[in-house]
Amino acid sequence: MADYDVPEITGEDGIVDVPALQPDAMKSHGPWVSKPEFQDAMHFPTDFNMPEDVSAYGNTDTLVENWKERALDKMADLKGRYRSLQVFLDICVKCGACTDKCHYYLGTTDPKNMPVARQDLLRKVYRRYFTFAGKFFGKMGMPGFVGAAELDEDVVKDWYNYYHQCSQCRRCSVFCPYGIDTAEISMAAREILDHIGMGQKYCTEIMGKLNKIGNNLGLPEAALADTLEGLEEDIYDETGVEVKLPLDKKGAEILLITPSADFFAEPHVDGLMGYAKVFHELGLDWTLSSYASEGANFGMFIGSYENMRKISLRIRKAAQDLGVKRIVFGECGHAWRVAYSFLNTLAGPFDFLDQNYPIPQHVLEITEPALAAGKLNIDKSKNDDMVLTFHDSCNIARGSRMGAKPGGQFDIPRNVIRAVCNNFVDMPADTIHDATFCCGGGGGILTDDLMDIRIKGAQPRMEALKHVTDKHQVTHMAAICAICKSQFTKVVPYYGFSMDMIVSVHQLVSNAIFLTGQLTEEEIEAKEAAEEAEWAAAREKAAAEKAAKESEEAEKETSDK
Amino acid sequence: MQMTIGVIYAVLFWAATLVLVLGVANKIRIYAKVPAPLKIPTTPAPVTQGGVVIRMMQEVFLFKSLFRSDKLLWALGFLFHYAMLLIVIRHFRYVQEPIWGFVQFMQPFGKYAGFLFIIGLLGLLARRLFIDRVRYISAPSDIAMLLLLIMIGISGLLMSFVSHTDIVMVKAFFRGLITFDWQPLPTDGLLLLHLGLVAILMLIFPISKLLHAPGIFFSPTRNQVDNPREKRHVAPWAEELEKQNKMFLDELD
């Protein structure tokens, strides 16, 4: 582990005390800048040059010609297309209700990480160039009187740095009396930055891979097929049942869209095996698609409707090409927000799918009712080595729903966990449900060049986790988001936890489910022993044959003499 | 002299009213015109339009989200806004003839609400000065706006309880405004200060954060129904992409 300044956690009441301000505590050059090549693929301007030295990234060396004019043009364009942006820029009264709600502020103490202050980085420019008050006081040389400011390179540096310290988790919008959502502001800011030569490498490079190959990892079809075959073997070895993970199976009923991390990362992949077992047991005919082998949609992170739509249309195409009747999403937070809230709008109408099912549907919306109806054979004791808690993923909690009732996104995953585990404890009320804290890695932050903010931003969640591990003997934390799982496995060790404590919800299902025809542990042992014996016998036989042959040859030799 | 002042203030109030009405109407027109291209209600959100009305009423009348986030701020804000409501209702008597029974009934409440108004505002001002996070995010105009309201309140209270003005003449002046009829106004310093500050408040309304009043009704995170799987929600500019089968806006004809 590299050396980072890790906040201290006590576990006392599970809540981080609101810290005093430390201006510029997180002033930095921000994440790595996106090359013209990546920007081009996203349809963003490319008339800039990369600095030779990485340390110069984010220092405005990459700004395009006439950047100021182009930034203001983009802002005018966006506020004419997004009511959220126009209204939110106008109506904030600076009451301060949000100031202690952001995990990045609590973890870093940098005042520019207070939601309102983060918004003000953009709002002050809007005030200066688009409002009467800002123009008037600006001309008098005192724009600051009405919270306005000139747009200069220092402002752009702050934009680049602090809008990449926002995970667009929307916790602030829950507590704002007007529902002002900083995510909308930071998406707009990133869209502006993308149009003036200051895009973020992590997001655009990943989307480039998706557009070329079909997933964020750049995992080609053959490798994907290999991986899935390997997983089938793993399940067979463990259960004696041939559970399939089909790829590009035409005419299947269900197309499963899942984050590509599910194909290889721990504990994601255990979740994927869980979905496969559930589908198998329910007799559902399903498939993955190599063309749309990604659930995540990074278009949202950079506020690009066009790129988000382009990625969403891949899913539509895959569904049509494969002739499926239903689309189901795996465990992923931002993917589910885009799927639940935006997919129908971006890539609909899905009139070619079976209208008797939600479009799209979350895998938990299949597993939960199946468990409730007793359709799955569950042995809860298989999870008795764990005491579980559950991390509500921000985008699922505050940007989507599961099931028919509001709040189903909180109940359904918990119902599933309770149905497959005996030991479950929730974290403190101010840190769960729609008050949940982001893992610290969402919204395009999950990159090594932002490790510092990722570690510090995790503090509120770590504090709540420490509370339940200390006071309630919790051993594991379940999550339903690929980013949460990746972020936590990387960050919890800095806080003194083990990375193995993070589990997928469907991993718990996978542990507890007993498939039809599944062999018991004894039977598997017996089977393994039998196979072992078979091997041994075969080896013995081969050895005996070899020895016989050799002695025969030796005999022949002697008789020849 | 009273006539001259009457004319000056009449012009001021007509202008202020014009700016307030047209300015806010223009902002509302913009808020209504700009599309919300995606469903972004902060969830859990109501799944019916009726549910959205209830959610919005809870925000507008009870400040529900604010109650969750900060109890002290909620109490101060609640005190200030409801005191202001009572005060505004009480002031109807200066333009009405005959005065509604309801307004007469509210008179004593409105009169003493002035003190709660000041207490609420002083509390809000203290937050801006003494809580480091709130001080950091306060622009001078945020403080100035509180001072403006405090001065309106104090000058009003002084006229109610200490130094009365010629209220009959004031009422004649405001009734005259409605019919575009010049009327004299008392040259009483407190009154002129009070009225002048109110006119300033009206003038800055459409160009300041006071827009939160009409704006909250347009806040997509609060006013949208949670039904994106059932209904598509395509903005006109996005529909163009579909119609012309294009991926990017700059490719549109």
Image (cartoon, coloured by chain):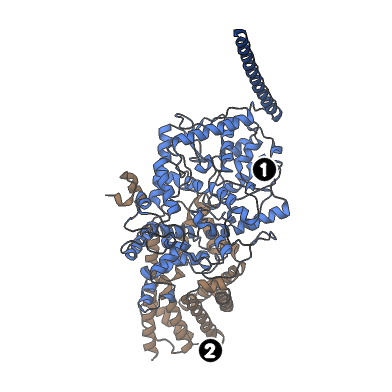
Chain colours: A blue, B brown
- Tell me: residue A398, above or below residue A361: below
Binning the other alpha carbons within 10 Å of mark 1 as few (below 14), some (14 to 19) or many (20 upward) gives some
The reply to the same-chain question for discs 2 and 1 is no
Q: Is residue A541 above or below residue B249?
A: above
Which residue reaches farthest left?
B253
Q: Chain of mark 1?
A: A
> Could you tell me if residue B231 is visible in this image?
no
- Asked if residue A137 can be seen in this view, the reply is yes
User: Disc 1 marks which residue?
Assistant: A418
Chain for mark 2? B
User: Residue at coordinates 41% horizontally, 39% vertically from top-left?
Assistant: A316
Which residue is rendered at x = 26% and y = 49% of the image?
A: B253
Residue under numbered circle 2: B163
Nearer to the camera, B51 or B39: B39
Quarter assignment of residue A429: bottom right
Question: What is the x, y in percent for residue A23?
Answer: 53, 71
Inspect the image, locate mark 2, and give the three-letter code of the amino acid beneath it. Answer: Ser
Residue type at mark 1 is: Arg
Question: Nearest the camera: B144 or A540?
Answer: A540
Instruction: Looking at this view, name the residue that lies furthest to the top.
Output: A559
Q: Position of residue A344 (x, y in %)?
A: 44, 44
Q: Position of residue A515 (x, y in %)?
A: 63, 30
SS of the residue at dot 2? loop
The kind of secondary structure element at disc 1 is helix
Point out the residue furthest to the front here.
A561
Quadrant for the N terminus of chain B, please: bottom left
Residue A6 in the image: state x and y as whole percent: 60, 61
